[in-house]
């Protein structure tokens, strides 16, 4: 095991990654805000007028148009939307291709773009966002208070420098195992990893076929939300660390 703060083969050290990320955030500690007590549910809902205007006839959008003929199969766009609603692991082109034959990566990405355009045009309360190695369907932040009232919010916690070190290593090298994290830091990181898992910032990655049996870790959609990132491509440019 290397001396603390050193890294073989010119790799960026955990401390360097953590300190650089902490500098970007404006301090050595980053607070995961405690969700304030939510307002009564009545205050979160828009006021409904006593008299409604006459309903104007509109043509339904393509995704909302019902399929009257049972023999008509769903479109690839509808299948991908259904997979996103089912949830579970982030949806990737490989997973979608298991349900839609001959689906290419370009077609998958186009479907994601079309869904988001439709959701925005209809002012839907959710959107398709990057999550882990794929995409997830997430409720818009405008409705976070309602979600936290139903399911509870996170407790306040402060990420000190060791936690930022480990979180930075996972963010930049994911999926990454505990042994590699320990080697980069020179310390046992089990307790810090468990803390990040409890905060919902880190989770075990999907095991790869024929790969190592060691548990690997990756960041979660909540990590992107807490640090206000649209995706992992928005991480600070520190120079891409090489893998061992």
Image (spheres, rainbow, N blue to C red):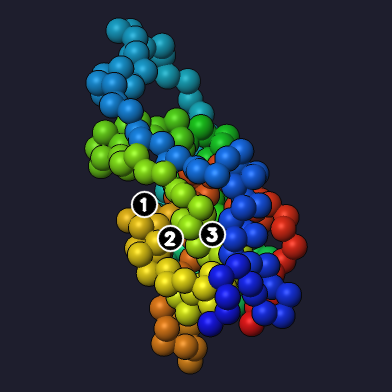
Is 234 situated left or right of 138 in this image?
right
* Residue located 58% across and 75% down the image: 3
Q: What percent of the width, then of the height, locates residue 162? A: 48, 57
* Residue 100: mark in rendering: none
Q: What percent of the width, then of the height, locates residue 14? A: 59, 64
Is 238 situated left or right of 130 in this image?
right
In the image, is residue 173 above or below residue 125?
below
Q: Nearer the viewer, mark 3 or mark 1?
A: 3
Tag 2 residue: 202
- Name of the residue lying farthest toward the top: 50
- C-alpha distance separating marks 2 and 1: 8 Å
* Residue located 25% across and 21% down the image: 40
- The number of numbered discs placed on residues in the rendered structure image is 3
Mark 2: few/some/many CA within 10 Å (<14, 14-19, 20+): many
Using the rendered image of the protein, determine whether residue 188 is visible from the camera's viewpoint.
yes
* Residue 199: mark in rendering: 1
Answer with the quarter of the image where residue 109 lies.
Answer: bottom right
Answer with the quarter of the image where residue 244 lies.
Answer: bottom right
126 or 38: nearer the viewer: 38
- Label 2 sits on a secondary structure element that is strand
In the image, is residue 99 above or below residue 208?
above
Using the rendered image of the protein, determine whether residue 204 is visible from the camera's viewpoint.
no
Q: What percent of the width, then of the height, locates residue 135? A: 52, 58
- Label 1 sits on a secondary structure element that is loop
> Is the residue under label 1 in contact with that under label 2 (CB below 8 Å)?
yes
35 or 164: nearer the viewer: 164
Tag 3 residue: 165
In the image, is residue 17 above or below residue 243?
above
- C-alpha distance separating marks 3 and 1: 15 Å
* Residue located 50% across and 43% down the image: 29
């Amino acid at each position: 095991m290397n001396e603390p703060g050193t890294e073989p083969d010119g790799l960026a050290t955990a401390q360097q990654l953590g300190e650089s990320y902490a500098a970007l955030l404006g301090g050595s500690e980053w607070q995961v805000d405690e969700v304030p007590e939510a307002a009564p549910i009545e205050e979160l809902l828009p006021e409904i007028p006593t008299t409604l205007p006459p309903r104007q006839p509109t043509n339904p959008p393509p995704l909302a148009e019902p399929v009257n003929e049972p023999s008509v199969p769903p479109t690839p766009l509808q299948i991908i939307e259904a997979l996103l609603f089912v949830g579970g692991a982030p949806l990737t082109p490989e997973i979608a291709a298991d349900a839609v034959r001959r689906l290419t990566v370009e077609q998958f990405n186009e479907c994601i773009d079309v869904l988001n355009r439709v959701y925005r045009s209809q002012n839907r309360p959710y959107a398709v966002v990057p999550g882990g190695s794929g995409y997830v369907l997430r409720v818009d932040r405008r409705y976070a208070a309602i979600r936290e009232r139903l399911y509870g919010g996170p407790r306040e916690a402060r990420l000190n420098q060791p936690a930022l070190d480990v979180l930075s290593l996972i963010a930049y090298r994911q999926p990454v195992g505990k042994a590699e994290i320990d080697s980069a830091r020179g310390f046992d990181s089990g307790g810090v990893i468990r803390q990040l898992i409890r905060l919902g910032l880190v989770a075990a990655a999907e095991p790869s076929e024929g790969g190592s049996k060691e548990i690997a870790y990756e960041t979660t959609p909540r990590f992107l939300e807490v640090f206000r990132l649209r995706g992992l491509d928005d991480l600070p440019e520190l120079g891409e660390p090489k893998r061992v």
